[in-house]
Amino acid sequence: MSKKFNSELSESIHESASALFVIGAISKATMREFDDSCLAKVPDAIPAEQIKALRESNNVSQPVFARYLNTSASTVKQWEAGAKHPSGMALKLLSIVQKYGLEILA
């Protein structure tokens, strides 16, 4: 699985740190710090309005959007109403769709 970095600079820094870790020049704890600072992060939450806007910007219905995200239409409806909040893999998929568009999941 390939890692996603914040930028090309972050990727270069992380590669250098990884090489230093492999030869024992930096500790596992230090390597974790590099992972945390260099790797792209998933947002903690996506507001209901943003989820609805994301779906509408891709011109799909709730059932179609749900199918792309491997969830139910009722779950998407609850996210958009603010009754439930996506977490875990759903949150990751939504952040990917925000960045690259729904066609990335096709």
Image (cartoon, helix red, strand yellow):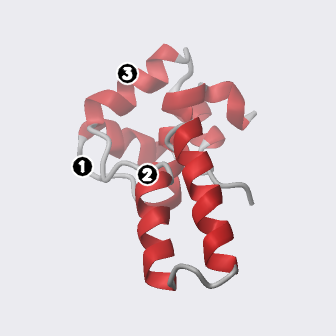
Q: Is residue 21 shown left or right of residue 42?
A: right
**Mark before the other along the chain sequence, 1 or 2:** 2
Q: Residues within 10 Å of mark 3 (few under 14, many from 20)?
A: few
Q: CA distance from mark 2 to mark 3?
A: 21 Å
Please state the horizontal and vertical placement of residue 86, each as a whole percent of the image. Answer: 39, 52
- Label count reads 3
Identify the residue at image location x=48%, y=15%.
57
What is the secondary structure assignment of the residue under circle 2?
Answer: loop
Identify which residue, 20 or 56, lies in the foreground: 20
**Pointer 2 residue:** 41
Q: CA distance from mark 1 to mark 2?
A: 24 Å
Q: CA distance from mark 3 to mark 1?
A: 16 Å
Q: Residue flagged by tag 1: what amino acid is it?
A: Ala
Identify the residue at image location x=76%, y=33%.
106
Identify the residue at image location x=61%, y=77%.
21
What is the secondary structure assignment of the residue under circle 3?
Answer: helix
Q: Is residue 78 shown left or right of residue 6?
A: left
Q: Residue flagged by tag 3: what amino acid is it?
A: Ala
Identify the residue at image location x=43%, y=51%.
42
**Pointer 1 residue:** 83
